[in-house]
Amino acid sequence: MTDRELHMDASLARSARILCLVSTGVIAARSGLDQQKIRDYERGVGDLDDAEVQALTDALTYYGARFIPEDENGGVGVRRKFTRTKVTMIDRWESEGGPVGEDDV
């Protein structure tokens, strides 16, 4: 990412999560935030402080979101870090090996 500041808002957070095909529960577990707080933020009815926004951004980045800061060519955006082929491969790899263990969560 460039040196430009990213302003995370509800629609960007929701878009990133959906694009990466992860649930609010998965993001909550990774970020340490309450799942309902993430849902409220995404719907625009709740706020997050700066540390919570950073935790949310880090979790979304971990799952493959690449944030594009606003510049002279357009507004903020999000895209997948991985190509469609890699996403399919990752999905396949994650489903191998049997059921998820308690220590996998």
Image: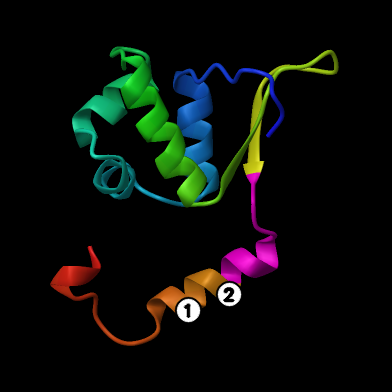
- Residue 12, magenta (yes or no): no
Task: Please state if 27 lies on the left or on the right of 93 as rendered.
Answer: left
Q: Are the two marked residues, 2 and 1, in contact with CB atoms closer than 8 angstroms?
A: yes
Give the residue at mark 2.
89
Give the residue at mark 1.
93
Residue 76 point in image, percent of width and height? 66, 21
Amino acid found under the numbered disc labelled 1: Trp
Q: Residue furthest bottom?
A: 97
Compared with residue 29, is residue 8 higher up or lower down, i.e. above or below?
A: above
Who is closer to the viewer here, 31 or 14? 31
The magenta segment is: 80-88
Specify the quadrant that holds the N terminus. top right
Q: Residue furthest front?
A: 3
Residue 11 point in image, percent of width and height? 50, 22
Question: Looking at the rendering, which quadrant does residue 97 occupy?
Answer: bottom left
Amino acid found under the numbered disc labelled 2: Met
Task: Please state if 38 lies on the left or on the right of 36 as rendered.
Answer: right
Q: Residue furthest left?
A: 102
Specify the quadrant that holds the C terminus. bottom left
